[in-house]
Amino acid sequence: MMERAAPLAGLRVLVVEDNYFIAVEMCRALRAAGIEIVGPARDLKTGLAAIRAERIDCAVLDINLHGLMAFQLATELRARGIPAIFATGYDASVLPDELADAILLEKPVDITALCRAIATSCS
Amino acid sequence: MTPSSSDPGWDPERYLAGVFDELTAVGTAEASARIAVQAAADLADADGLCLVSPDGDCCVVALAQQQEIYRCDLRSSGLYRASARQLPWSEEDLLQLPTGEHRRIGGALIVPLQATSGYAAVGFFWHPGQTADREATRKIELLARALGLAACRWRMEEEHAARQRDQQRITAELQHRLRNNLAVLRSIIRRSRETADSAEHFALHLEARIGALARMQGTLAAIGKADVEFEDLIRTELSACAVAEQRYLLQGPAVRLHAKGAESVGLAVHELATNSLKFGALGASSGSLAVKWAVIGDPSPRLRIRWVESGVNIVTVAPRRRGFGQELIECTLPYELGARSRLTFNPGGVLCELEIPLEACATSVEPAAQQSARGGSR
């Protein structure tokens, strides 16, 4: 993790996750890697508001947010040229065609893998 | 007669067997109708056929010498009457194709099909002035039976494919829940470790928390429903903590919590009950607990829950640092359900007040007029 810290430091990452404990754990681990957290957002509405109001370098999205799918957020991010990474219990087959090339990490998410995905997406 | 049937070596039985093989190899009404109409022309010089749907609304028409297959609504033409099994097509009846073209279907031979084929009957018709003789009728009936069997088969295959798709969807959903649960569990383990005083406490609490999570999900899975009665949820948690029914009072209207609401609220109730047993009213012989709830607020209704402990003689001190249960009530519920919460450590016992937007936690509420008090000792 230490050698990963350098390229991630100062990046602003939006976290969208409806489960409190998962959100807290993920935010804490990302902060430890030097990342500045935007959010965490618990639903589509707050996620969308954050995308529109904040400067974001990358986003980590849960797919199922209280039963609603987060693809709209990914599309909105993509329109702004911001990479989105999915962190979800679903496998890649749920992704719609236009998002099929997005990075998807299966839960429980490995934080090292997540940091690597953020670094790759933002490079 | 077509060249094939005028061939001296031509065997209608073998020909029909071949048609049956062809029919079972295709999987749509259109393809079957095309094969069948060609066979009907070869066997009995028929002009066309009409597969009649049970309601007459989507009949399939195929004409010999034409590749086009038509879908017709016979109800509008008046050809579909009371029962498709006794279609009384007369000499005068005209079948109007979607192209606007008409076909005379007088003297049609109607053969009923078994219901599982998805069609009520198939009607074969001839050029004006022509009808089927006895031999032709026998062959056409055999052909109709083959067509019916093929239709049953492709329909079963369609249902099988639909069931398989359902199965895949359910598997994906289960996998999603399982992975999500593992992630939640991992986070709870970390938080429990951080908030525990000792390894022993950590193990003890973690075990109990996993138990509470399992009870919430078990209740939902067992009744095979997507929601759970709030009162049952509290009762289940309290009895899992071995709290006698005389020690508590539950009072409020019937409210059904959906899965997400039940999980978050259930965990909070578990923490309140455990803490109460350890430090509060449920742990002292003189103490008692009342949980009262009501639906308040209009137009945005909220479920207000008051957990009121009383009769604790010792002055309970508020914990110096935020424990797991406190975090659950003060952080998790607001984050996950948009709840407002207040946890107070009073001299007589703990007071916990929750206000949760109804749509974030419940599927249904009994009408306010039917509200009735339900005591824990009942």
Image: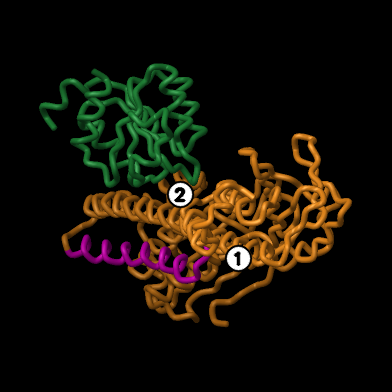
Chain colours: A green, B orange
- B348 on left or right of B355: left
Percent x, y for residue A112? 18, 36
Quarter of the image for residue B120 reads bottom right
Secondary structure under tag 2 reads helix
Could you tell me if residue A95 is visible in this image? yes
User: Camera-side residue: B28 or B219?
Assistant: B28
Residue B97 badge: none
Residue B333 badge: 2
Q: Range of the magenta residues?
A: B200-226
Badge 2 crowding class, 10 Å Cα cut-off, few under 14, some 14 to 19, many 20 or more, is many
User: Is residue B215 found inside the magenta-colored segment of the image?
Assistant: yes
Residue B142 badge: 1
Residue lying at the far left of the rendered structure: A3
Secondary structure under tag 1 reads helix
User: Camera-side residue: B360 or B64?
Assistant: B64
Could you tell me if residue B323 is visible in this image? no
Which one is earlier in the sequence, the residue at label 2 or at label 1? 1
* Quadrant in which the C terminus of chain B appears: bottom right
User: Is residue B133 found inside the magenta-colored segment of the image?
Assistant: no
**Protein chain holding label 1:** B
Look at the picture and state if B232 lies above or below B148.
Answer: below
Q: Amino acid at mark 2?
A: Leu
Q: Amino acid at mark 1?
A: Leu
